[in-house]
Image (tube, rainbow, N blue to C red):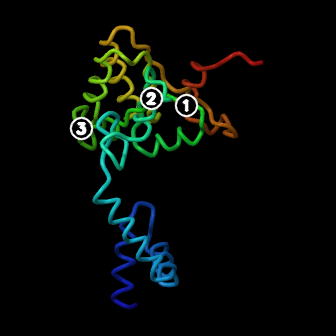
Amino acid sequence: MSQLLQNVVGELSKLPGVGRRTALRLAMHILRMEPESVADMTRSIDRFRTDIRHCVRCNNLSDEAVCPICADAERDRSTVCVVEQVADVLSIENTHQYRGLYHVLGGVISPMQGISPSDLTIDLLCERLERGDVKEVILAVSTSVEGETTLFYLMNRIRQYGGVRVTSIARGIGFGDELEYVDELTITHALRNRREVE
C-alpha cells in the first residue's frame, strides 16, 4: 500500500467509530472526489478546529461568543434543558418540540474516568440560576450509572435556588422494545413514570 494512502487511512481511523476498513473506503472516496471539493472539506475542518468557540452562556458550540440559541429572543428564557454534550442539543432541536434554552455540561460525573463535578460546567449553570430568570431546569442526562450520579448531584445543587422547578425527561421502555430484554433500572423508571392510558 502507498505510504500516502497508509497515512490517510491512519489519520481517518483515529476518528471514533472508524476502523481501518472504513478509513480505507473513505480514503478511496476522497481520492475520487474533485480536488476543489477535497480542498473545501479540508478548509472547513481546519476552520472548524481553529474558529469554533463555546458559548459563554450555555457552553454550546458557536461561531460567536453567544450561540444562536441563546441569542434568539423568541426562546423561552425561563426554562433551561441540561444535557451532557452538544450532540444532545442537536437531538432535542431536531424534534422541534422544545423552545427553551440549554446548558451543556461537557460530560457526566465519572470517578472511574477521573471526571469530577469541577470538570463539568455546573458552576456556570449555577451562575445562570443565581440571576433568578430561570423557573424550570429540565435534566436530560443519560440513564447510565454515571448519568444517574450526575442527575443526583445536579438536583442537590439546583435545590439551593428556591423557586426553581427541577424536572427530568421521562425515562422508560423504548418504542418497540420487548420487556424481557429491558434492564431493571429502565423498568423501574418506566413504572415510576407511568401515565394514564387514553
Using the image, tell me which numbered label, if any, was put on residue 81: 2
Q: Nearer the viewer, residue 140 or 97?
A: 97
Relative to 68, 7 lies left or right? left
The residue wearing badge 1 is: 98
Name, please, the residue furthest toward the top. Answer: 162
Q: Residue at x 63, y 19 (%)?
A: 194
Q: Quadrant of residue 79?
A: top left
Q: CA distance from mark 2 to mark 1?
A: 9 Å
Between 63 and 105, the residue placed more toward the observer is 63
Q: Which mark is residue 119?
A: 3
Nearer to us: label 1 or label 3: 1
Q: Residue at x 44, y 18 (%)?
A: 136
Amino acid type, callout 2:
Cys
| Lower sequence index among marks 2 and 3 | 2
Q: Is residue 195 left or right of residue 55?
A: right
CB within 8 Å, label 2 to label 1: yes
Residue at the outermost bottom position: 2
Circle nearer the N terminus (2, 1):
2
Secondary structure under tag 2 reads: strand
Where residue 52 is drawn, which disc sits there?
A: none
Residue 139 percent coordinates (x, y): 44, 27
Query: Is mark 2 in CB contact (under 8 Å) with mark 3?
Result: no
